[in-house]
Amino acid sequence: MSTARAATPLAPSRNTDPTASPTPDATDNAADTAERALRHAKVRAALADEGLDALLAYGPGWRRENVRYFTDARAEGSSSLVLFPAGPGAPVTAFSTRRGDLPVLSGRGWVDAAAEVDVFDPAPLVEALRALGTRRVGVAHAELLPAVLAAALERALPGVEFVSATTLMDRVRMVKSDWELARMRRSAAVCAAGWEAFVDVLEPGLPEYRIVAEVEARIKLLGAEDNFMLIASGKDEVRGMTAPTPRVLEAGDMVRTELTPQMDGYWLQICRSAVVGPPSDGQRRSFALFDEAVAAGIAATRPGVTAHDVAKAQNDVFRAHGLGEYCTSQYTRVRGHGHGLHLDETPIIEGNETVLPENAVFIIHPNTYTPLAGYHVLGDPVRVTADGCEVLIDTERRLFHSEKGVAA
């Protein structure tokens, strides 16, 4: 079942710099300590299951979610890592190629030490691995590890086996704690504010990039660290979304967006479409189709179902209306994806048998092209509950429209 949630008020940010880590108070310190202990227990259990002596979490510039999981800090170097030993009591150490990251990585107190590392000569990391006496190390995002760094580690540590632990960390991060959900609820409130800014500015003659600028201004004022956003405007010729362009809105256009702010490390997304002026019959019919598909995905969500099950429930709506071909990879076949410290986690797609446990968070969005009104965007993020799911945003699911600047 789907559970409505009361709006979450937006408290002022505790930092004038929204990119900085939150300034802790006594309550935060206790909650942080408990969260850190919970994470360490989860990771150690996973390492024991895989027979690993340590985990090396690697984070390139565009995939830092595992490093942030251990540090609760935003690294900015081209490469950052965390060495997490399987045995309790051993030090947890962060590394970065950027010296300026070191006080940031250690400042939250989630790691015991931080050191600069060179991917060509990773001596501090090698010495830390030797000190632990590791024989089998899991590497999260091993597939992204620079070849020069992987080769340097293998040369310096010939007796150590390095194996991929990317899936291990994906599983660990999938189930969100209450601490994480509190941060994601704040992201949900910022999603709603961003969408309000989006609709408020729509009018003929406005370029797409101005819409995005208005949204960015609104959410950054609320403390958003970052924002992933795609947009498209036009009529039934639109086949997908891109970064904003200079294209100017016209009366009758449907404007589509995926709006994904990041708050305190956590990403959450809202998918909506709005019309410049009164919606056409085709646009209304398109919305009704997509709304039915979202509702079917929500109804299918409960602990133990798979990503395949949720995707199929959405796609079956299109098939029932004779539009099943638009669920294929020729158009768009992904029907959502996981959320958390990375904006695009487990794909909600037919064929993905990943089980969705209680407190997994993902967006249900059957975004695709159909001939009814072109590409349509609609979706809500949900949390899997004990008996169904909770929709995390309060923004109404409807076809929005703006009358601003449109002749009567």
Image: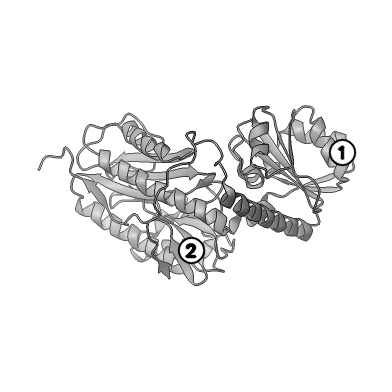
Q: Mark 1: give few (<14), some (14-19) or many (20+) Cα within 10 Å.
A: some
Quadrant (top left/top right/bottom left/bottom right) for the C terminus:
top left
Residue 157, label in figure: 1
Which of the pair 278/339 is nearer the observer?
A: 339
Which residue does the numbered mark 2 point to in the structure image? 310
At x 18% / y 40%, what residue is drawn?
Answer: 404
Residue 349, label in figure: none
Give percent across and percent down for residue 266: 52, 47
Does label 1 or label 2 sit earlier along the sequence?
A: 1
- Residue reaching furthest to the left: 408
- Could you say which quadrant of the image residue 405 lies in? top left
- Could you say which quadrant of the image residue 357 lies in? bottom right
Which of the pair 309/34 is nearer the observer?
A: 34
Q: Is residue 286 left or right of residue 381?
A: left
At x 34% / y 40%, what residue is drawn?
Answer: 232
- Residue reaching furthest to the front: 26
- Of circles 1 and 2, the one toward us is 1
- Residue reaching furthest to the bottom: 387
Question: Can I make out residue 192 in this image?
Answer: yes
Disc 1 and disc 2: Cα gap in Å?
A: 44 Å
| Local secondary structure at mark 1 | loop
At x 51% / y 51%, what residue is drawn?
Answer: 183
Q: Are marks 1 and 2 in contact (CB under 8 Å)?
A: no
Which of the pair 168/383 is nearer the observer?
A: 383
Q: Is residue 229 left or right of residue 350?
A: left
Residue 210 in the image: above or below residue 239: above
Give the residue type that dot 2 points to. Answer: Val
- Could you say which quadrant of the image residue 201 lies in? top left
Give percent across and percent down for residue 351: 55, 60
Q: Is residue 402 left or right of residue 23?
A: left
